[in-house]
Image (cartoon, helix red, strand yellow):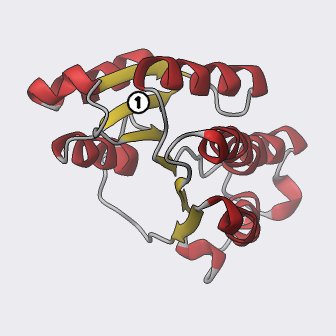
Amino acid sequence: MNSTTKVALVTGAGSGIGRQTALAFLKEGYSVTLVGRRREPLETTAADSGTAGSRALVVPTDVADPDAVRSLFAKTVESFGRIDVLFNNAGVFGPSGPLEDILVEEWKSVVDINVTGTFLCAREAFRIMKDQHPRGGRIINNGSLAAHAPRPHSAPYTTSKHAITGLTKSLSLAGREHDIACCQIDIGNAATGCW
């Protein structure tokens, strides 16, 4: 890899906002690790980037699995040498309905992917960004307008996105001394083809 090439890791890169973001990074010359639970959509993203796909690394990963996330970041550093940008985009909406009808398993599934997955990826990024040369990087968390204006019957999703706001603020403070910037984007409904 060219030492001047920047490296991005995008979760949820097989569809929607993550896919479009990964394609934009590739178009801008980044090397990009494409992350998602299913290999085929990730390979489609890489193929759709044309010749830039030679700079894409496909790593199917469940971001809620700590061991899988550690392996993901190790493979990225092994392939590209560093990580400049982490886009924490993987997420699910989860069940929609009256609070009393939501199963504990459904609640935990949303929190595991949306919150714990974001934490696990950010934790690994911090470990790498603090020690790489030049040090530092940027973490971008995909929040939601639901953190500001919840939809009815969306308690698990809305709660998870409020948690992302708190996590983002904590990461931003913790990262300052290590040249790691962290921010959050809050997107409303997007015509991504996922629905």
- Residue picked out by circle 1: 34
- Residue lying at the far front of the rendered structure: 133
Residue for point 19% across, 48% down: 28
Q: Is mark 1 on a helix, strand or loop?
A: strand
Quadrant in the picture for the N terminus? top left
Q: Position of residue 129 (x, y in %)?
A: 60, 45
Residue for point 65% across, 41% down: 131
Query: As drawn, is 49 to the left or to the right of 195?
Result: left
Residue for point 29% across, 58% down: 191
How dense is the environment of label 1, judged by Cα within 10 Å: few (below 14), some, or many (20 and up)? Answer: many
User: Can you tell which quarter of the image residue 150 is in?
Assistant: bottom right
Residue type at numbered disc 1: Leu
Position of 10 relative to 192 (above/below): above
Residue for point 76% across, 45% down: 116
- Residue lying at the far left of the rendered structure: 51
User: Can you tell which quarter of the image residue 162 is in?
Assistant: bottom right
